[in-house]
Amino acid sequence: GLVAASPNRFWQWWPFSASNLARCKEDLLGLLKLKVPERELHEGISGVVQLFGLLLFVWMAATGTVLYIYPEHEHGLLHLVEEVHGIGEGLIPAFLVLHLGGLLAHLIKGDHSALQKMFGFRR
């Protein structure tokens, strides 16, 4: 995301624009009808899920680093950091379910483009 090809760089997409939020709404309504959304990279619901994952892992890295540097965190602000880190631990499975669920939905549909993008192979 930092040194990838231009369309894959983090700063090339922002999922909370008005147009993308409208696409997210369309995607969610389509999923309710068991229709898998067909979007470009980082558009619609996939962009929101990807941003959620990025923010979650940055959150976990930052709070984990603080807890590692200051191992005594019984009281005060460091205790709060520990609690917030614990919340992140609970959100990681939710992110994985969303992310892998999207991949599986595309694979079941017969769309293998995500695998091709990730691993660079063709069917």
Image (cartoon, grey):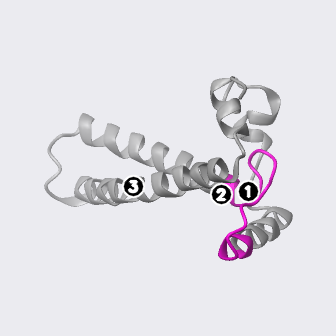
Check if mark 2's residue and mark 1's residue have beta carbons within 8 Å.
yes
- The tag on residue 48 is 2
- Reply above or below: 23 against 71: below
* Frontmost residue, 2 versus 41: 41
Mark 3 sits on what residue? 93
Question: Quadrant location of the C terminus?
Answer: top right
Other residues around mark 3 within 10 Å, as few (<14) / some (14–19) / many (≥20): few
Q: x%, y% of residue 100?
A: 52, 50
Could you say which quadrant of the image residue 115 lies in?
A: top right
The answer to whether residue 100 of the structure is visible from this angle is: yes
Other residues around mark 2 within 10 Å, as few (<14) / some (14–19) / many (≥20): some
Could you say which quadrant of the image residue 80 lies in?
A: bottom left
Q: Earlier in the sequence, mark 3 or mark 2?
A: 2
Q: Secondary structure at mark 3?
A: helix
Mark 1 sits on what residue? 15
Check if mark 3's residue and mark 2's residue have beta carbons within 8 Å.
no
Q: x%, y% of residue 44?
A: 75, 59
Q: Secondary structure at mark 1?
A: loop
Q: Which residues are magenta?
A: 29-48
The answer to whether residue 42 is magenta is yes
Q: Is residue 54 left or right of residue 20?
A: left
Q: Residue at x 63, y 47 (%)?
A: 107
Separation of disc 3 and disc 2 at Cα? 16 Å
- Under mark 3, the amino acid is Pro
Closer to the eye: label 1 or 3: 3
Check if mark 1's residue and mark 3's residue have beta carbons within 8 Å.
no
